[in-house]
Amino acid sequence: MQTLSVELGHRAYRIHIGPGLLARADLVLPHLAQPRGIIVSNTTVAPLYLARFSDTLERAGIRIESVVLPDGEVHKNWETLNRIFDALLTQRAERRTTLIALGGGVIGDLAGFAAACYQRGMPFIQVPTTLLAQVDSSVGGKTGINHPQGKNMIGAFYQPQLVLADTDTLATLPDRELSAGLAEVIKYGLIRDLPFLEWLEANMEKLLARDTEALSYAIHRSCQNKAEVVAADERETGQRALLNLGHTFGHAIETGMGYGVWLHGEGVSAGTLLAADLSRRMGLLTQADVDRVSDLFVRAGLPVAAPDLGYDAYMNLMGVDKKVEAGRIRFVLLRELGDAFVTGDYDEAALRATLTT
């Protein structure tokens, strides 16, 4: 097991990464305010891991209840969120009862947002079971739901007490979901960690083959990068926005195509290539740089060609992005590989060419 800390003063918390962690009640017990927890999971993950994890905690003297939600990005909405509130009220959850998210990014975002709201805040723990959730969405305290007009537009910053990333859960992850998680892994190399990007280029086949050592290293390195950024800028007033490389375009793809048609990581992949192309058109990257980025995403099994939504549709969808400032869309672009920046100063003709060529 490897352990990292997200340094946020008195709200600092640990990220444990390794195999067999669903059997480690000792890692969870110190973070429970009372001997009770409510696990939020979904119809895909619950049959695989809910009973095992519940038994672990119950054998340690913890009373466990659960709520199982439908699976998929299309369910990341008010209706599903309210099902969590219904369960919490029905089960008479208290302010000191801990909510535990067992699943991927959708479950983590829903449960975290519910925890932030219920009785104005209850403790919660992240137990991510997908690669994308283990390297990104479970860390940093972003919670929320989607709106028909924009992804993740309603939510709250609310930090977990603990992140427990059991790498054994990746054994049951579909190949498409594994690839989607690799999009966020690659992102860290592109925005701030060129040596990691080079390591990914040398080890992509090992990651796709689910080599335990390679996956553990990639998860640890990704979480280390994110923990450092979050500690420096918890509420995304500055450098944390760099973590959104490809996301402004990618969220437009996810929303425009209909939630769940493109996985989040697939949208990020195609969106990152759009960001790289815009960086090239602005004279920052070379075509060789763009080809290098594209090759890595292709090797990861990810799409690099964005859907043709049309320029106007892209602009309308990106107009509700959270980085919009004074009515101007701001993008995360690349000065070079391993060095990203946020800007609203871009050539609109270049942007049109990127979205229509």
Image (spheres, rainbow, N blue to C red):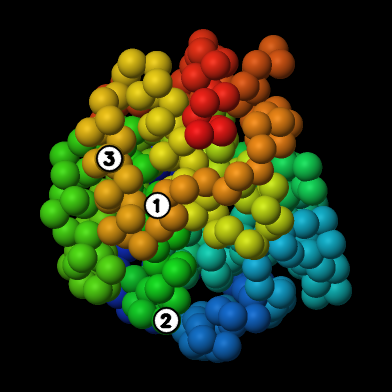
- Mark 2–mark 1 Cα distance, whole angstroms, equals 19 Å
Which is more toward the observer, 274 or 55? 274
Disc 3: CA contacts within 10 A as few (<14), some (14-19) or many (>=20): some
Decide which of tag 2 and tag 3 comes sooner along the chain.
2
Under mark 3, the amino acid is: Asp
Q: Is residue 91 left or right of residue 271?
A: right
Q: In this rendering, does residue 168 appear at all? A: yes
Does the residue at mark 1 contact the one at mark 3 (Cβ under 8 Å)?
Answer: no
Which label's residue is closer to the chain start, 2 or 1?
2
Q: Amino acid at mark 1?
A: Ala
Q: Is residue 337 above or below residue 40?
A: above
Callout 1 secondary element: helix
- Identify the residue shown where x is 72% and y is 42%: 150
Residue 158: percent from left, percent from top: 61, 44
Query: CA–CA distance between discs 2 and 3?
Result: 32 Å
* Residue 290 image position (x, y, % from top left): 30, 35
Q: Which mark is residue 172?
A: 2
At x 65%, y 68%, the residue is: 72
| Pointer 1 local density, CA inside 10 Å: few below 14, some 14–19, many at least 20 | many
Residue 310 quadrant: top right
Residue 132 placement (x, y as % from top left): 45, 58
How many numbered marks have been drawn onto this rendered protein structure?
Answer: 3
User: In the picture provided, is 239 more to the left or to the right than 102?
Assistant: left
Q: Nearer the viewer, mark 2 or mark 3?
A: 3
In this view, the mark in front (1 or 3): 3
For discs 2 and 1, the disc positioned in front in the rendered view:
1
Q: On the image, numbered disc 3 is attached to which residue?
A: 291
Q: Circle 1 is placed at which residue position?
A: 183
Q: Of label 1 and label 3, which has the lower sequence position?
A: 1
